Image (cartoon, grey):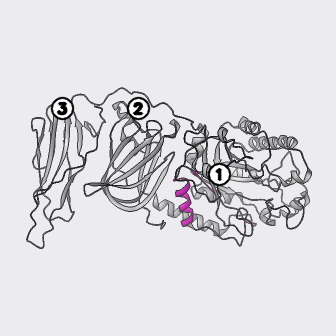
Amino acid sequence: MKYITFLASLTAVAFMGCTCTSNQQFSKDSDKVAVTGVSLTRTQLDVTPGSSFTLAATVLPASATDKSVSWSSSKPDVVATDAKNGSCTALAEGEAEITVTTTDGGFTSACKVTVTSSHTPTTDPGAPAAYGALPTAGQLAWQKQEMLMFYHYGQATFSGWDGENPDCNGKAWSESLLLNNYKPTTIDADQWVKVAHDNGFKEVIITAKHHDGFCLWDNPESTTDVANAGCSNHTDVVQALRDACNKYGVNLGIYLSPWDRMIEAAGVSTSVYETRFKNAAKNLMEKYAPVTEFWLDGNHAGNFNWSSVNSTILSVNPDCVIFSNGGPGCRWVGNENGDAGTTNWGTINIKGRGLTPSNLPGNYESYLSQGDENGDTWCVAECDFSIQAIGDHNGWFYGANDSRKTAKQLMQLYYESVGRNGVFLMNVPPSNAGVIDAKEKQVIEEFTTMREAIFAENLAKGATASSSSVRGGYSGYAASNILDGNYDTYFATDDNVKTAEIEVTLSGSKTFNRVLLQEYIPLGQRVKSFTVEVKRNGSWSTWASGTTIGYKRILLGSRVTADAVRIKIESALACPVINGFGLYNDTVSGL
C-alpha cells in the first residue's frame, strides 16, 4: 500500500463514501429542528502507531436543535477514541472504524483508520518522463501570458481599405495613394500600451505591415513607409510601441503580412520578394528586440520557403513564438471568432497535415480549433478576434460606426479561449485620433472589473486534498500540490497508472459555478477525459465532465454548494500530472 502525507502524521489515500444509518424518531415538539444526517470530513485515513488526530463531524441540517454526538472505535486496542470529542490515538498496527452517532435520530457515519509502521517513502522515485511533443521555454512563457492585445493601425485607419479589396476607394494601389491616405496628427502609443497593461494584457502586437504594403517603420526593403518624404507623419510607430512596452513591462509582438498589394502591383517575383521579406523580418527582430511573437498572416501568403523564413526569425531570438496557420510556435484557431474547441490539444500534426502559412488543407476550422491528439508539434491555438464587429472598416481597423462587443461577450471569449487551453488575442484598433477610443476603453475596463470579480477569491483556499494513488507513494507528488499555487509542483501517479481520483475537502461548504484545472504541460499534455463530482449532504454527484485540460481548463456549470470536490481522471495518454485547481463563483457575467 502507498501512503500520502497528511499534516504531520495523518494520511488520506482513498475515497470511501460515508455510511449513514438511522433509527430516527421524530420529535413531537413542533419547535424542534430534527437531525437529518451526519458526515465526516474524512472517511479513510492511514496513520502510524502513536499518532494522535481528531475527526470532525457535520450534523445536518445546520439549524438542527440537538447537534450532540458520541464517538466509538470498533477496535479500541488499535485506535482509542474519546467518546465526547472525537480525538483519537493510534495504539497498534491494524484497522479500526471510528463511528460518530448523533444523539437525535441515531444517524451514523464512519471513518476507516489503517495503522501501520510503514509510512510515506522518503525517496523520490523521479519525475514522470516527458510525454509527446513539448513546449519550448518560449512557448510556455508565451502561453502563461494568457491575454494579448492586437493593434491594427496604418493607412487603412484613415482610408478604410486594408488590401482585402482589389482597389482602394476605387483607385489602383500605388505608393503615393497609400502615403496620401495616412494622415495621423497624434500617435499616442503610450496610451495604447497603458490600456493593455492596466487591464492585464501581457503582450501587444502591431501591424508593422498589413496587406496593403504600407509600413509603420523605416523598412529597408520598401519605400512605402513612414520614412518616405511624401508621408505626412514620420513617427516610427513600432519604435514608439517598443518604448511604451519597455515603460510598462509589456511584451512586444510584430505582424508582418506576407500578402502585399504593393508587391503585386510592382510585379515582383516570389523569389525576390521572399528575400526582401526575410530581410524586413530580420530588421524588425533586431531593431525592436526583444520580439516575443512574430505574426505571419496566412491570407494570400506567398509560396515562400517557410522553413527559411522561420529560421531567419529564430536566428535572432530562438524563443520567439511564430504564429501562422501551422506555427511553428502557435497556430491559428481556425476562425476569427475568438473561441477554441471544447477539446483542444496543444499539439498538432503540422508535417502530417502539410500546414504552412499558405496551405490549409481540408476542414481546417475543425482541426485547428481542436488540435491533434499525439500531434507531431507543440503548437497551441491562438484565438484572435476584434472588439469591433464587421462594419465600415471590416472590424480589424478602426471604424467609428462599427458596433462593439460587450464586457459579457469578452468574458465568454475568455472562457472559450484561455479556459479551453488557448490564448486570448483581442484586436483593439487605435482610432484615427491616434488613441484607443473611449468606447473600446470602457468595454475593456468593464471586462477587467468583471474578470477580477470572478477570480478574486479561490474558494479552494484552505482545502485539503487526497488521492487514490501517488507516484511512488512519495509526498513530493501528493494531491496537495494542486492547491499550493506553485506552478512547478504537481500531483502525479506511477507510470502505469493512467486514471486517478483526487478528492478535495473544502474548509466548510462553498458555493461555486466555475472549476479550474491545470496540467503541468512542461511534461506534455496527457488527459483525454475527466469528470468533476461534488459532495452534498454526504452524497456524491456528477457536476461536469470534459475532455482535454492542457495549460488551463475552466468548466462552467450550475451553481452548487458543496463540502468536497472529486476530480476523476478517466483516461490519459500517460500518467496524469495535475498542478492547479480552483473554485470560483461567477455572479457577475450572466453566463
Q: Which of disc 3 and disc 1 is earlier in sequence?
A: 3
Q: CA distance from mark 3 to mark 2?
A: 31 Å
- How would you rate the neighbour count of disc 2 (Cα within 10 Å): few for under 14, some for 14-19, many for 20 or more? few
Q: Which of disc 2 and disc 3 is earlier in sequence?
A: 3
In the rendered structure, find residue 496 and report the number of the disc placed on it.
2
From the image, state whether disc 1 or disc 3 is nearer to you: 1
403 w.r.t. 247: above or below: below
Say which of 370 and 230 sits in front: 370
Do the residues under discs 2 and 1 have CB atoms within 8 angstroms?
no
Q: Is residue 259 magenta?
A: no
477 w.r.t. 226: above or below: above
**Label 1 residue SS:** loop
309 relative to 405 in the view: left or right = right
Residue 238 visible in rendering: yes
What residue is pinned by disc 1? 363
Do the residues under discs 1 and 3 have CB atoms within 8 angstroms?
no
Q: Which of disc 1 and disc 2 is earlier in sequence?
A: 1
Looking at numbered disc 3 in the image, what kind of residue is underneath it?
Answer: Pro
**Label 2 residue SS:** loop
Q: How far from the left and from the top, in percent, is residue 257?
A: 77, 50
- How would you rate the neighbour count of disc 1 (Cα within 10 Å): few for under 14, some for 14-19, many for 20 or more? few
Q: Which quadrant of the view contains residue 123?
A: top left
